[in-house]
Image (cartoon, rainbow, N blue to C red):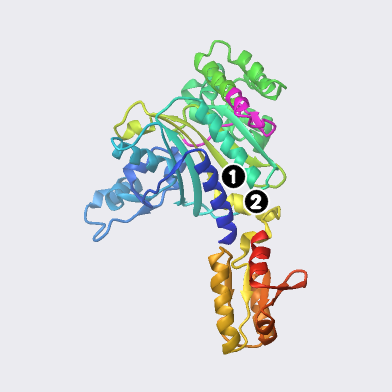
Amino acid sequence: MYKRNYILDHIKSVFQKYGFMPLETPAMENLNVLTGKYGDEGDQLLYRLLNSGDFLKKVKPEDLAEGTKAMSPKIAEKGLKYDLTVPFARHVVMNQHEIAFPFKRYQVQPVWRADRPQKGRYREFYQCDADVIGTDSLICEAELMGIVHNVFEGLNFKDYQVSLSSRKVLEGLAEQCGVKDKFMAFCTVLDKLDKIGEEKVTEELKAFGVERASCEKLFNAMNAENAIETIKDFLGDSVIGKEGLDEVSSTFNYMKRLDIPLDKFTFDPSLARGLSYYTGVIYEVKPTSIQMGTITAGGRYDDLTGIFGLKGMSGVGVSFGIDRIYDTLEELDLFPKTSKESSTVLITNFDTVSEAVALNILSQLRASEIKAEIYPESTKLKKQMNYANKKGIPYVLMVGSQEIEKNEFVLKNMDSGDQQNLSISQLIETLNRR
């Protein structure tokens, strides 16, 4: 938890620096809020909760014969939330008259998916989301990329790549490949490019109507040094595709004006975020030095609030996957030692006289905002030192009869073994300077 809080506290501080306000939504939502927002795979991964009481009371024998699709709505009306964005849209609609738009909120909460647990995949995991809703401005996309840069810079993590594209670019590519009517299937296959390679993607695209020649032209355009220009040529007269390219280019231009370094950001036209509510610029972050899936992602969603009754409200957001970020920092040994410190100093306890003095010192240290504790019982020094070692406390303050007499106390550095004789004022100054 110390390591998790190190990540969470840092991300929250970045969100707040960009003007985002905190929000929480319930763990449970009505299933009609959740279903149909995450694609077919997402619907299958929703955790459904049985209705309380006699959950079978609405079920008829013919429903049992028809199977799960007929049964599910009658025995389960609620589910655990799959992400933070859809519940956020629902919240915005319910509170639209109390919110100042554009509304900038951040949210740090667990979500649940009925997935098979494996490396980087969990059934319960935390997301840290920042969203802006109520504006079409691409400044928001650029600021979210600034948040990505600030978060990972602050975590001292530099081995990552941010891919940007647009769902509109993908629509244009599908249109030029002659499979506009099979857009979702086209996206699903194209998203496999980095996993299975061009040849296998070509075979899968051919299976639903894309010609091999079109695939070759598409891959040549994607692999060109200036992908934005070559994709623009490939898109031909596709209005929506070129609109998407303009949005990506504008996002990069805004990032330049915000002095966001662009070395880790790249245009990737094969990027196809799986959530079906995305409509504009999309992005994802992956580590480059270790095998790990997406650790941060997001995009623009137009009219997500429309399904709850508030039309024409565009939003955009980014989501940090805390558990994968934790695993990444752990594997790369990037957690600072201080991230798991409970106390800075342990004060010894030898007898009733030293205990009284130690408690007075303890009070002064805490008043100076120093994390400190006393060993609660009078016991041997070895036991107290072992306690400090096991708990990772970097300093032990010796309060014995000789120290009390001199009014100077021995501060021992548990890592180096170095010791200093210090007055109370010197002790506070030394620990605060650290």
Q: Position of residue 73 (x, y in %)?
A: 30, 47
Classify residue 90 as left or right of residue 223. Answer: left
Residue at image location 27% in from the left, 59% down from the top? 52
Classify residue 385 as left or right of residue 60. Answer: right
Q: Quadrant of the C terminus?
A: bottom right
Residue 328 - label: 2
Residue 121 visible in the displayed image: no
Q: Closer to the N terminus: mark 2 or mark 1?
A: 1
Residue nearer the viewer, 341 or 48:
341
Classify residue 145 as left or right of residue 124. Answer: right
Q: What is the crowding at mark 1: few (fewer than 14 residues within 10 Å), some, or many (at least 20)? A: many
Reply above or below: 249 against 17.
above
Q: Quadrant of the N terminus?
A: bottom right
The residue labelled by disc 1 is 295
- SS for callout 1: loop
Q: Position of residue 312 (x, y in %)?
A: 35, 25
Q: Tag 2: residue type?
A: Thr
Q: Position of residue 154 (x, y in %)?
A: 63, 46
Residue at image location 62% in from the left, 38% down from the top? 149
Q: Tag 1: residue type?
A: Ile
The magenta segment: 253-275
Reply above or below: 158 against 28.
above
Residue 263 falls in which quadrant of the image? top right
Label total for image:
2
Residue 207 falls in which quadrant of the image? top right
Residue at image location 62% in from the left, 65% down from the top? 341
Residue 288 visible in the displayed image: yes
